[in-house]
Image (tube, grey):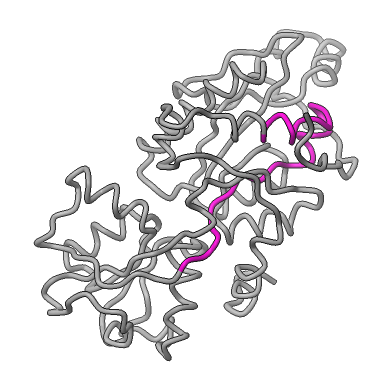
Amino acid sequence: MSTRRAVRSGGLAERALSRRGFLAGSAAALAAGLAACSRESPVSSSGGAAASTSGSRGSLTIGAIPDQDPEVLQRLYGTLADSMSEALDLDVVYQPVTDYGAAVSLFRTGDLDLVWFGGLTGVQGRLQTPGAEPIAQRDIDESFTSVFVVNPATGLTPADDLTPLADLRFTYGSETSTSGRLMPAYFLSEQSVDPQGFPGGPGFSGSHDATISLVSSGSYQAGVLNEQVWNARVEDGTVDPAAVVQYARTPAYHDYHWLLSPQAVERLGDDLPDRLLEYLTGLPAGGEVLELFGAGSFIPTEAANYTQIEAIGRDLGLIS
């Protein structure tokens, strides 16, 4: 049963497969191979080269912003790719990316079909790729939060007042992270703290895990990261409570979501958004995929959920 409006393609041409595997052929055979195939084989869920697709199966390349350690991401999205491949009868492969900007760029060029974006990068990807559509978010993403953490040497104890952070050496996560930069900067400014005015300027650690490490080591006195990662690291014992503690929590906002490219819909059919949504919302509670995502379920989402993020991104000059 259809649950969503089908995404319509902008008529963009399909990408051709890489020359690899066709070098021994003639020029005519190479041209025929390029016309018949749709994409280069990216990294498989196990980390090696993906197997070539069969004639009856399409391929879908998924990606994600690199907001955690690579090993964590490989396990998460490799597991998802295997599950999605079986459920949708597609060759689904996970392609790691180097940074947040690369995820947006590769989505725009069609090298990534389906990407797990944060709120801000999702807005950037959608605005740069006409026809792209948000598909689903986790249940926790409609009310997401960030936490400010401090090194105990600051003498700060948990509070709602963010103004004491203004005098500390402070690090965000990635420059375009929703939970590690955009929304914390907004909430700081709401309490009259200049989000760029920290001594020496703010740092940008690159990921939530790196923020914890930098504050723990004393390289920065304070920082901010998404609460889900923070809680997970506390629970698994990664966080040393003698080296870094939670200081404050932000109000809630919408964040992470899956964004589907129009090129994928053009290649695999107008029913692809519905098939993906049915798969994601049908994942069993307590199953491995949802456990790895730290969620109880996936739920439908829409572009209107990210209007606040878009407005704040424009105010901060992160969306032109």
Please name whichever residue, 296 or 293, is drawn nearer the observer in this view of the structure: 296
Query: Extreme right residue here?
Result: 11
Q: Which residues are magenta?
A: 252-277
Residue 140 is one of the magenta-drawn residues: no
Image spot of residue 48 (x, y percent): 47, 20
Left or right of residue 226, residue 6 in this image: right
Q: Where 156 sits versus 100, above or below?
A: below
Residue 254 is one of the magenta-drawn residues: yes
Please name whichever residue, 12 or 154, is drawn nearer the observer in this view of the structure: 154
Residue sitting at x 23%, y 57%: 213
Q: Where 313 sits versus 121, above or below?
A: below
Left or right of residue 293, residue 248 in this image: left
Residue sitting at x 19%, y 47%: 238
Q: Quadrant of the C terminus?
A: bottom right
Left or right of residue 294, residue 123 in this image: right
Q: Quadrant of the N terminus?
A: top right
Residue sitting at x 36%, y 37%: 72
Q: How many marks?
A: 0
Image spot of residue 31 (x, y percent): 85, 18
Q: Where 187 sits versus 90, above or below?
A: below
Please name whichever residue, 39 or 22, is drawn nearer the observer in this view of the structure: 39
Image spot of residue 87 (x, y percent): 61, 19
Query: Extreme bottom residue here?
Result: 192
Image spot of residue 68 (x, y percent): 38, 47
Left or right of residue 70, residue 266 in this image: right
Residue sitting at x 43%, y 81%: 195
Q: Where 91 sits versus 175, above or below?
A: above
